[in-house]
Image (tube, rainbow, N blue to C red):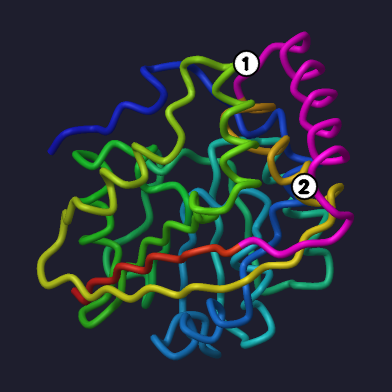
């Protein structure tokens, strides 16, 4: 199994974006959480592991259903922000660990998820661990959510990221992962939704991305910050919607 190379190997750290990520990247729609529940993920009394949890967006969105949730991330800053945002959700346990470092017992979980992150992992390490940790009949689900490139505003935002950060290659790693199956008998579904934004929230969403704050130096971040907001103010209204597409792929063990 081949590990996917992201942005030509350019280093990135979502921990540099934690405050912005927690504020502006909590945008999964209700339809997504409804689908997870339909698949049995997050149900009361079940044991669920969320890999690459970031600021805990997905566990926080499902905590009300009563699952015992373990959520891990490589970034200490991301986990610290997740804990702040989850203070009234005692059924979520956060741990600072890379996906490759996890070492839970066999048959520990009814569900394991990886949302917006599986292409960052080494499949040679994590795939056998997922197979071991899931109970018989358990489910592994990976998710890729993307704003749709057909919209002019996403084209303008992407072009500015690419102008300032030439190593950023957008969704190419995600798409490669989407086409790769590491487990047998995949099930797939897609959701298309219109998500509401203001200039501020769209700008914040772009700032808290791999191509900007997670990888740029301070000078480039300032340049993007100024030029992107100026572009939004010049070309776009205060409020708008952007179509997003969610790709869900799941496997039963």
**Label 1: few (<14), some or many (≥20) within 10 Å?**
some
- The residue at 55%/44% (across/down) is 73
SS at circle 2: helix
Left or right: 48, with 164 as reference point: left
Question: Residue 193's spot in the image, x, y percent?
Answer: 56, 73
Residue drawn at (56%, 79%) of the image: 33
Question: Could you tell me which secondary element the residue under label 1 belongs to?
Answer: helix
Would you say the magenta stretch is mainly helix, strand or loop? helix
- Please provide percent x and percent y for residue 8: 36, 18
Between disc 1 and disc 2, the foreground one is: 1
**Quarter of the view holding residue 66:** bottom right
Q: Is residue 95 magenta?
A: no
Q: Which mark is residue 164?
A: 1
Q: Nearer the viewer, residue 106 or 76?
A: 76
Which span of residues is magenta-colored? Answer: 215-242
Asked if residue 217 lies left or right of residue 123, the reply is right
Q: Is residue 6 above or below residue 153?
A: above
Q: Position of residue 26 (x, y in %)?
A: 70, 60
Q: Which residue is mark 2?
A: 81
Do labels 1 and 2 touch, CB within 8 Å?
no
Who is closer to the viewer here, 201 or 182? 201
The answer to which image quadrant residue 197 occupies is bottom right
């Amino acid at each position: 199994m081949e590990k996917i190379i992201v942005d030509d190997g350019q280093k990135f750290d979502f921990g540099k974006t934690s405050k912005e990520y927690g504020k502006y990247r909590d945008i999964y729609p209700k339809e997504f959480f409804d689908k997870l529940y339909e698949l049995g993920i997050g149900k009361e009394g079940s044991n669920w592991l969320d890999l690459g949890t970031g600021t805990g967006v997905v566990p926080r969105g499902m905590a009300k259903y009563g699952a015992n949730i373990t959520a891990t991330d490589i970034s200490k800053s991301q986990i610290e922000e997740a804990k702040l945002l989850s203070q009234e959700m005692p059924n979520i346990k956060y741990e600072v660990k890379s996906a490759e470092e996890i070492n839970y017992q066999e048959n520990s979980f009814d569900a394991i998820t990886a949302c917006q992150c599986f292409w960052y992992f080494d499949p040679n390490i994590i795939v056998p661990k997922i197979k071991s940790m899931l109970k018989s009949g358990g489910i592994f689900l990976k998710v890729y959510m993307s704003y749709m490139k057909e919209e002019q505003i996403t084209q303008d935002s992407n072009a500015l990221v690419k102008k300032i950060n030439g190593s950023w290659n957008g969704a190419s790693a995600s798409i490669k992962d989407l086409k790769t199956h590491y487990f047998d008998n995949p099930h797939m579904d897609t959701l298309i939704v219109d998500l509401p934004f203001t200039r501020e929230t769209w700008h914040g969403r772009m700032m808290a991305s791999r191509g900007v704050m997670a990888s740029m130096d301070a000078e480039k971040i300032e340049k993007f910050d100024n030029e992107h907001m100026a572009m939004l103010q010049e070309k776009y209204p205060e409020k708008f919607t952007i179509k997003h597409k969610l790709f869900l792929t799941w496997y039963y063990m």
